[in-house]
Every structure is written in C-alpha cells, then in structure tokens.
Amino acid sequence: MMLITISLVLSLFQQSLASTAFCQNKDYESGALGDFPSQLYNAAPFHPVQLNYALPPAKCPSNDDIDGYFFLSPGSIDTLQEDTSIINADGTLVGSIPGLFMGMHKYNGTNHIATWTGTHEPVNNAYGSGYITLLDDTYSMVANFTTVNLGVGADIHEVEITSSSTAIMVAYLPRRTDLQAYGGPMNGYLADSIVQEVDIATGRLSFSWNALEHVDPSESYAAFGSTGNGSVEYPWDYFHINSVQKQPDGNYLISSRHCQAVYLIDPSGTIIWRMGGKKSDFVFPQGLEFSWQHHARIHNRSTLSLFNNGASEWQEDLPFAQGLLLKFDYSNTNKEVSAINARNPFSPSHRCSGDPSNS
Ligand SMILES: *[C@@H]1O[C@H](CO)[C@@H](O)[C@H](O)[C@H]1NC(C)=O
Ligand SMILES: *[C@@H]1O[C@H](CO)[C@@H](O)[C@H](O)[C@H]1NC(C)=O
Ligand SMILES: *[C@@H]1O[C@H](CO)[C@@H](O)[C@H](O)[C@H]1NC(C)=O
Ligand SMILES: *[C@@H]1O[C@H](CO)[C@@H](O)[C@H](O)[C@H]1NC(C)=O
C-alpha cells in the first residue's frame, strides 16, 4: 500500500517538473518516460515537448550569445506540436504562439516571426501544405500568404523574406507520372518539389521552379517504396526539397535531401551546378560527402554550410548528425570541396555534467 502511494506521488511529481528542462536524463533517453514526454500546465491548454539537453545552451562554453530566447517547434513522426515554444536558454518556457516556427525574418526593415499552419503528409508528417504568417514585435499578424496557382500551399521547410518584400517558399505537388522505370506503377504519383518567389503584399509570382522538369528521378537515393507508395495522397517523394536561399546575384541554392545534393539554379531555372549526389560537379575528399542533409546556405563565394543528417528513416550512413562548413568555389572553376569545420554536436566533449536533473 505504502509503495503504491509513493510511486503515485513520484509520477505526479514527474509531470509537475513542467518548467524544468532535463539534462541527459536516462529515463528520458531509455523511453521510460514515453515516446513523447511533454509538459503539462494547469492554466493553459498546450503540451510543449519536455526538453532533455545533451548540453544546456546556458552552459555551452562556446556559446556567448545566450541572453535571448530560443524559438522551437519540435516535429517528427510521433511529435505533433503545432505551436512554437519560446524558451529561456536554461530551457524554461516563456510562452507559446500558434503555428510552427519558421524563423525570424526582416520584413520591410523590421524583425518578424514567421509561423506555419496547415496539413501534413499523412504517414510521416514529412512535409505539408499551408499558410505562412508574419508577426510583428507585438505578436500581431501583418501578413498571411502562401503559394499561388499551384493547388498545394507552402510547405513547412523553408521561407526566406527578401529585401524587396518577396517570400521564397517551397511546396510539394503530387504529379501523375509513369513510375515503371523506377519500380512504381504506370499510373502513379510522385511528389514534385516546387520553389516560388511571391510578392507578399500583392501575391505576384516572380519565380517558379519545379524539380521534375530539371532533375530526373533516377538521381534519387530514396528508392520507390522507401518514401511514398505512389498514390495521390502519398506520392513518391523522390526529391524532397528542404531549403532554398536566394543569392546576391539572383541565383537560387536548393537542397534536395533525397538526391543528397544541393543545386545552384539561375533565374531561368537552369541548373548551373550540382554539389553532392549522383552527378556532382564538385569533388569531395573521402569521408566528407554529405547525405540526407538540410539547411544549405552559401555565406560567400567560398563558404557553404549545411546540416549533414547522415541518415534517413531507412538508412544510416553516419552514427551521428553534424554541422558541415565547406570551402568551395562558387564559380565551380576549382572543383575541390574541402572542410573548414565538421562539428558533431553529440561528441563526448560536448556532454554536460553535474546537472541535478541527471539520473
Ligand atoms: C511592406 O512593404 C510593401 C512594399 O513597400 C508594402 O506594399 C506593404 O504594405 C508593406 N507591409 C507592411 C506590413 O508594412
Ligand atoms: C490565413 O489565411 C487562410 C486563408 O484565408 C486562412 O484559412 C487562415 O486561417 C489564415 N491564418 C491566420 C493565422 O489567420
Ligand atoms: C498508400 O498510402 C496511403 C496513405 O497511407 C493509403 O491511404 C493508401 O491506401 C495506400 N495506397 C496503396 C495503393 O497502397
Ligand atoms: C567567407 O566566410 C568565411 C566564414 O565566415 C570566412 O572565413 C572567409 O574569410 C570568407 N571569405 C571571403 C572571401 O569573404
């Protein structure tokens, strides 16, 4: 009887740890707290994820920019947190706003929060179709926009706001395609990856690009069946666009997770070069090739960063994900890529110790 009471008290206590982030909590890591530990509040209806830091940002010795807040919307197959948590560097929750966090952006000269709301791909929440809103510094909505004349709305992976008040968005469009050459049905569907640049105030379309016109599905590393069954509601996601960055010269850098490549596109849509993947115009030293990456950004004509996942849901190439900072030649005259830095965020030297919530 006594034991039962104690375990009841403990489990309630666990839930009331709501405002404290864990650090290397073994029960969390083992799954003992469930697949999706979340925080509960008596006075508010939201259930933000319970964080479990490998290293709390406030203790990170290499991070001296810890005065501000962190904005995050964790999302995965099991996690459906359709709002943005605003947290202190120590992990305590400051507030929550509706919609998934899409970054902080300058719009008409001042900072705005971008959020996304919409519907997700039905099986893995791997992409979506919806609207992007911009909130000003009073959290008031000043814009609500999406793709134009497409039939599907803006996806969750990317939005860039340009200094000319346009938004660059991506979208996933099911297209009826003969997939027999790729192991699928004759009357199948694939998910084409779309880029649009749209004037936020007027909705005028100034740039539109689709992967299928320029990149053959044979460039994909996601074989038919690994992602999507070729139906209209679950099309084969051969390209999986996940970032776009407009360059100062008007070109666009596009990241394809499933072709494991980044593409430089000119304003007419023509591919200038590919980096990575099956038809790379660049040469990588052994061990530096990236795979299943996200968030490719060129910083200047000799530096490119990306998040190298090193794994997909069905294949593991690296035992960890890493940030990669690469030296390269934008003009592709020099075809050698080299590493400036390759940082594995979960290396042993980056672990914290002595946190009271360790267990
Ligand atoms: C932003 O600037 C554009 C172009 O000048 C203008 O049309 C639009 O109304 C502005 N939006 C806001 C919210 O100030
Ligand atoms: C944005 O516009 C769409 C279409 O009108 C609407 O359904 C949605 O509710 C709007 N979003 C917000 C946050 O108002
Ligand atoms: C494909 O997957 C979707 C989503 O899970 C499902 O509704 C549909 O029945 C499947 N179709 C086939 C032909 O397997
Ligand atoms: C490009 O950016 C990197 C990283 O910020 C810097 O180390 C390098 O000096 C820059 N190169 C040029 C040519 O500006």
Image (tube, rainbow, N blue to C red):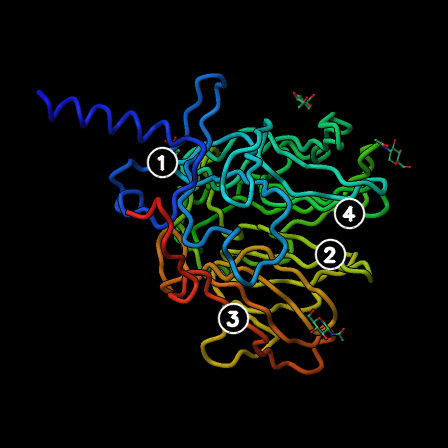
Q: Earlier in the sequence, mark 3 or mark 4?
A: 4
C-alpha distance separating marks 4 and 1: 40 Å
Label 2 vs label 3, nearer the camera:
3
Q: Earlier in the sequence, mark 4 or mark 2?
A: 4
Which disc is residue 255 wearing?
A: none
Foreground pick, 83 / 78 = 83
Q: Earlier in the sequence, mark 2 or mark 1?
A: 1
Q: Which residue is mark 4?
A: 207
Q: Which residue is mark 2?
A: 269
Q: Amino acid at mark 3?
A: Ala
Label 2 vs label 1, nearer the camera:
1
Q: Residues within 10 Å of mark 2 (few under 14, many from 20)?
A: some
Q: Which residue is mark 3?
A: 342
Q: Amino acid at mark 2?
A: Gly
Q: Disc 3 on helix, strand or loop? A: strand
Label 4 vs label 1, nearer the camera:
1
User: Residue at coordinates 44% horizontally, 22% vertically from top-left?
Assistant: 41
Residue 346 percent location from the top left of the image: 41, 61
Q: Which residue is mark 1?
A: 36
Quadrant in the rendering for residue 214: bottom right
Q: Disc 2 on helix, strand or loop? A: loop
User: Residue at coordinates 37% horizontally, 27% vertically from top-left?
Assistant: 16
Q: Amino acid at mark 1?
A: Phe
C-alpha distance separating marks 2 and 1: 41 Å
